[in-house]
Amino acid sequence: MLKLGFKEDVDSILRTIKKQCAREVQICLFSATVPHWVREVSNYYMHKNARIVDLAKDLKNKTAHTV
């Protein structure tokens, strides 16, 4: 998905929202996996005290090794 421009699309949408809103808005990101680019985008657009909730924290196999 990264090669298809997904990161750029998410970044473009969030950048547009940030420009268009006169006041601060709540941004929630949901992802089945949290690759490096998701953390980069969330660190840039979200509050520094953003909370990450890991719903599969106790599972041994969170994702397939080939993802």
Image: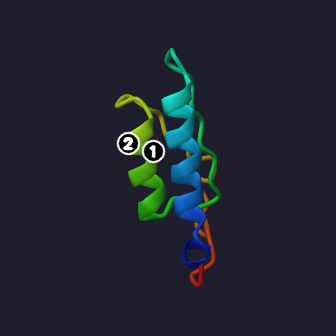
**Figure coloring:** rainbow
Q: Is residue 30 above or below residue 35?
A: above
The circle drawn on residue 42 is 1
The circle drawn on residue 44 is 2
Looking at the picture, tell me which residue is in the foreground, 21 or 29: 21
| C-beta proximity under 8 Å, tags 2 and 1 | yes
Looking at the picture, tell me which residue is in the foreground, 52 or 8: 8
The circle drawn on residue 8 is none
Residue at the (60%, 35%) spot, across then down: 28
Give the x, y percent position of residue 11: 51, 51
Mark 2–mark 1 distance (CA, rounded to whole Å) = 5 Å
Q: Is residue 12 above or below residue 1?
A: above
Q: Amino acid at mark 2?
A: Tyr
In which image quadrant can residue 17 be found?
top right
Badge 1: residue crowd in 10 Å (few <14, some 14–19, many ≥20): some
Give the x, y percent position of residue 44: 38, 42
The mark total stands at 2
Residue at the (62%, 70%) spot, across then down: 63
Q: Amino acid at mark 1?
A: Ser
Residue 13 visible in this rendered orientation of the protein: yes
Give the x, y percent position of residue 30: 63, 46
Element at label 2: helix
Residue sticking out furthest to the bottom = 66
